[in-house]
Image: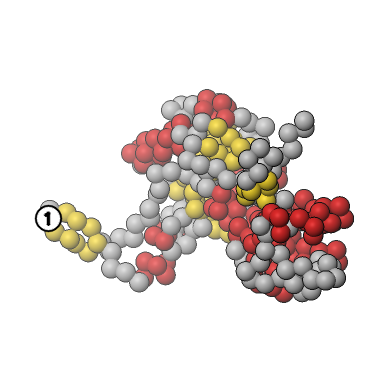
């Protein structure tokens, strides 16, 4: 995999700059995203601005963390994931087809793009900087406002549509690695949330998971379509603690000592309520821990064994 130093070493000044916009739709069973892209010519001033934005994006990153369902980064770190674990190759391949037929010639072709890709090409290869579009790209949003600009101390009507290009990117693709700065946009553009929803559906249908509860309806309603709760549910499925009889036995004995609100019934099943679901998830994720030193109880977002 490409590492952060590879990203830092990419020479933007010697790279050519191309701008692609993409629209997305889903097709097939199970549904998979399909991307249609077109490219647009840029003037030199905009190329300079895009190089500057990409330079600031990569310079701000000082560390990387492995992408995980519950992993979170900050302004100076990026989550990384192999490109082949996502659908990114689809829009990357589309951007190789920079033919006259794919060139945008009318303003209307820009409208309603879901995201744009700034492709930097050099002898080192290609760097793809990706950003989800904002409301200025949406036809319906534009139709609901009067657009203006200020010049010569006067506010004037702006009849020509404008499309905002942000001074940052949500993620970058270099060689076989994706560097993610804004996780929700990454999951939206590459349909990772849809994959989480499929995983949660499978979890709810699993007989061993159903056997934990008097009903899973409350759990289903608690998760809904919330991205974070879907990630947590997927992590519960992936970790599989609920399948471990020893783990569940310890949980039934110790949950009260760890301050968890889990309504266990006499038969050992859980009767979930909306109020108890957060603690049920913490328990099944093994995210409620107790310090041997201070005896204080903590919630953690990620757990990893030290191997000692």
Q: Is residue 37 above or below residue 74?
A: below
Dot 1 falls on a residue whose secondary structure is: loop
Left/right placement of residue 56 relative to residue 297 reads: left
Residue 297 position, x and y percent, is 64, 48
Q: Quadrant of the C terminus?
A: top right
- Tell me if mark 1 has few (under 14), some (14-19) or many (20+) residues whose alpha carbon lies within 10 angstroms of its own: few
In this picture, residue 243 sits left or right of residue 110: right
Q: Position of residue 79 (x, y in %)?
A: 59, 41
User: In the picture, which quadrant includes the N terminus?
Assistant: top right
Viewer-nearest residue: 285 or 32: 285
Q: Judge left or right: residue 274 versus residue 20.
A: right
Is there any visible trace of residue 25 in the rendered image?
no
Q: Residue at x 34, y 60 (%)?
A: 161
Which residue was labeled with disc 1? 153
**Residue 167, quarter of picture:** top left
Q: Nearer the viewer, residue 169 or 205?
A: 205
> Where does residue 66 sit, x and y in percent of width and height?
65, 39
Q: Nearer the viewer, residue 236 or 256?
A: 256
Q: Is residue 11 above or below residue 216?
A: above
Q: Residue at x 52, y 47 (%)?
A: 182
Q: Which of 132/72 is in front?
A: 72
Q: Is residue 7 visible?
A: yes
Quadrant of the rendered image containing residue 234: bottom right
Residue at x 81%, y 54% (from the top left corner): 250
Name the residue: 39% across, 35% down: 52
């Amino acid at each position: 995999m490409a590492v952060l130093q590879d990203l830092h070493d990419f020479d933007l000044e010697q790279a050519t700059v191309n701008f692609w916009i993409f629209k997305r739709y889903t097709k097939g069973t199970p549904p998979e995203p399909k991307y249609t892209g077109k490219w647009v010519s840029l003037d030199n001033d905009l190329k300079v601005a895009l190089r500057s934005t990409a330079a600031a994006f990569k310079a701000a990153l000082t560390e990387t963390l492995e992408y995980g369902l519950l992993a979170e980064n900050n302004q100076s770190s990026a989550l990384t994931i192999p490109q082949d674990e996502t659908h990114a190759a689809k829009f990357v391949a589309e951007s190789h087809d920079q033919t006259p037929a794919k060139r945008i010639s009318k303003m209307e072709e820009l409208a309603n793009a879901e995201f744009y890709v700034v492709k930097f090409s050099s002898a080192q290869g290609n760097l793809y900087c990706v950003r989800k579009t904002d409301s200025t790209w949406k036809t319906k949003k534009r139709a609901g406002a009067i657009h203006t600009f200020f010049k010569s101390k006067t506010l004037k009507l702006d009849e020509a549509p404008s499309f905002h290009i942000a001074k940052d990117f949500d993620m970058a693709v270099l060689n076989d690695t994706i560097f993610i700065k804004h996780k929700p946009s990454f999951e939206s553009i590459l349909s990772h949330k849809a994959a989480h929803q499929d995983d949660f559906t499978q979890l709810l249908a699993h007989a061993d998971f159903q056997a934990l509860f008097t009903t899973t309806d409350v759990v289903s309603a608690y998760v809904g379509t919330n991205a974070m709760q879907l990630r947590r549910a997927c992590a519960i499925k992936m970790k599989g603690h609920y399948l471990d009889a020893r783990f569940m036995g310890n949980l039934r004995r110790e949950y009260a000592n760890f301050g968890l609100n889990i309504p266990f019934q006499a038969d050992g099943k859980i009767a979930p309520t909306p109020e108890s679901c957060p603690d049920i998830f913490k328990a099944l994720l093994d995210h409620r821990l107790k310090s041997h030193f201070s005896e204080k109880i903590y919630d953690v977002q990620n757990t990893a064994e030290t191997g000692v």
